[in-house]
Image (cartoon, rainbow, N blue to C red):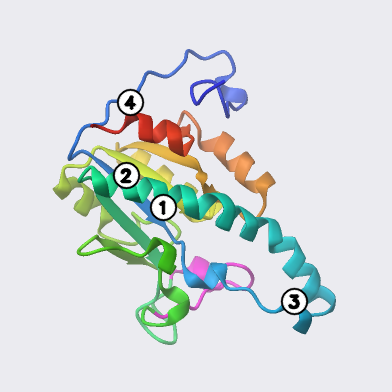
Amino acid sequence: MNWKTNWRSFYYQGAPEPVDPVLEAGKVALLVIDVQNTYLERPDPATLSGEDLDRYHAWTPFHERMHEKVIPNTQKLMATFRAKGLDVLFARIACLRQDGRDRSLSQKKPGWNNLLLPKDDWDSQIVDALKPEGDEIVVTKTTDSALTGTNLRLVLANLGITHVVCAGIFTDQCVSSTVRSLADESFDVIVAEDACAAGSDELHDREIEIINMIYASVMSTDEVLGYLPG
């Protein structure tokens, strides 16, 4: 089993295997999506009780996946792209106003997506383990899609990029929205599955299956690296 046969949804059972992507120097970029301090910060469980403690434990598998798999694989991707002189870009959620009035409606609704992350606050910064280097491009958004809320489409076009490798969080939200937008703009998208995470493995697996083949080619980090230009 490999990426050509894995993660197939109902729609693609029995479909021909996809062809190998041709990734060319100067035309392929890595996009790391929303791996920010706010999502990796955890309270001391000794200070929690009741529903708060239950919620802490419910999120433990996500944090384990992030530290054991997603961050190390993203570091591997970033290091290889940089070593080969390929572009590494980042997207992050951050509002321009301290009160968040510039946020999109989806980030003002009550609940999980009610995000107030002013652009200069610690919570909104990219985690140190995946910190941008030099003049690597970081786009700031108040939307799920990194394209609809920024000038990223124009930036990628100006850089001559045709293929975008995506990593980050959350698979079923900002990663998926970004992948769909990229595909709609005729970019060829690859998702590094083991460099992404959702709130639960079930949500991650379900979304990976949904976007596979129609919006993106879903691969492991090592499979992606095997296609990078020398």
Q: Is residue 29 above or below residue 58?
A: above
Secondary structure beneath dot 2 equals: helix
> Badge 2: how crowded within 10 Å, few (<14), some, or many (20+)?
some
Magenta stretch in the rendered image = 104-118
Disc with the residue nearer the chain's start (3 vs 2): 3
Q: Tell me the CA gap for discs 1 and 4.
A: 22 Å
> What residue is pinned by disc 3?
45
Residue under pointer 2: 80
Mark 2 or mark 1, earlier in chain: 1
Quadrant (top left/top right/bottom left/bottom right) for the N terminus: top right
Q: Is residue 16 above or below residue 220?
A: above
Q: Which mark is residue 50?
A: none
Kindly check if marks 3 and 1 are in contact, taking CB atoms under 8 A apart as contact.
no
Q: Which amino acid, by three-letter code, is at mark 3?
A: Pro
Earlier-in-chain disc, 3 versus 4: 4
Callout in the foreground (3, 2): 2
Query: Between tags 2 and 4, which lies in front?
Result: 2
Q: Which comes sooner in the sequence, label 2 or label 4?
A: 4
Residue drawn at (63%, 73%), measured in percent from left and top?
Answer: 42
Main SS category, magenta section: loop
Label 3's element? helix
Amino acid on which disc 4 is placed: Pro
Residue where numbered disc 1 is placed: 75
